Amino acid sequence: MAEIRILADPKLRPELKGEGLLDLDALCAREDLHTIKARLTSRQTYRLQTSGGHTLYLKLYHEVEPPSRFAGMFAQRFDSPASREWHVLEKLHEIGVPTMRGAACIEEVNGGVKRAALLTIGLDAQHSLQTVLMEEFGEYPQPLRRQKIARDLGGILKQMHEGGVNHRDFYLVHIRVGHDDTLYVTDLNRADIRKRVTRRWRVKDLAALLHSAPHSVVTNADKARVAKVYFGGHLRDHRSMIQAVIRKADRMTAHTRKRLAQGESNYHVVE
């Protein structure tokens, strides 16, 4: 018989339980789920509203692939992407990185995790940083505002890496922009928690950020501001790593263009 494992915010647990939101079968059968993302048949993302007025986002994993036997060698091991994201959210709050608030994590276990769900509290941040850059900075440069955003972005990634978290999908579409341009890190289902984030993973996160930056809007000065905050000191002292980031970003861009040419959709800006 399957076992159900539940992690939930103590303050929200009574409300979630009362509305059947801690029951996987009930969650899957709900008719008030508004689809947000459904790129994979095994995973969908929905928005829903509770009677208490909370806007929640639900990630449903209908199938959970068993983790690789090498997955826990250098990073903390998790049984499902839902529990991974739950614990990463807790870690980010612990080290002071703005992100979502977890409401509940539910796993159906029968030998391994077969199904899982993650519920998070909706952020007051409607647009991604990519959208803000494309729609608000293309025509009006807004130097002071863009300087603040660049510094905050570099500081957030530095906090994450120094705190033992690497994102693995650190694209601009996964950074949300809230009130007073507060930046929030989202889409953490692939993130790792490590004792130390090594150079390899630092390069990958920085390269993903550089790859997703719209070239028509983001200037070299913007990139330099992000790098100065992230690295600290003189950028020339980090030339080797910066060059590695640029090479990796170029490979990512070339790969994306190839996939686009083959007709595959992609939401990361490369032009």
Image (spheres, rainbow, N blue to C red):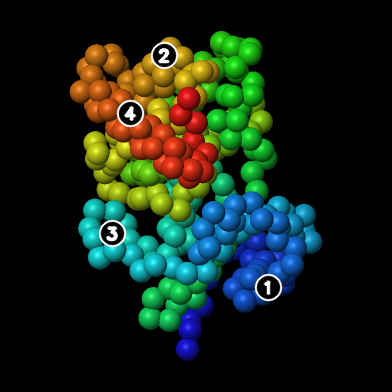
**Viewer can see residue 189:** yes
Residue 112's spot in the image, x, y percent?
39, 76
| Closest to the observer, 261 or 58 | 261
Q: Which marked residue is nearer to the observer: mark 1 or mark 4?
A: 4
First reached walking from the N terminus: tag 2 or tag 3: 3
Q: Label 1: which residue? A: 29
Quadrant of the image occupied by residue 163: top left
Which residue type does callout 1 highlight? Ala
- Real-space Cα distance between discs 1 and 2? 49 Å
Q: Residue 265: give x, y in percent of width and height.
A: 51, 43
Q: Is residue 102 above or below residue 170?
A: below
Provide the residue designation for mark 2. 220
Q: Residue at x 70, y 56 (%)?
A: 34
Tell me how far mark 2 sits from mark 3, CA to CA. 36 Å
State the mark number for residue 250. 4
Q: Which residue is more in the foreground, 216 or 25?
A: 216
Is residue 14 in view from this perspective?
Answer: no
Q: Which mark is residue 5?
A: none
Q: Which mark is residue 71?
A: 3
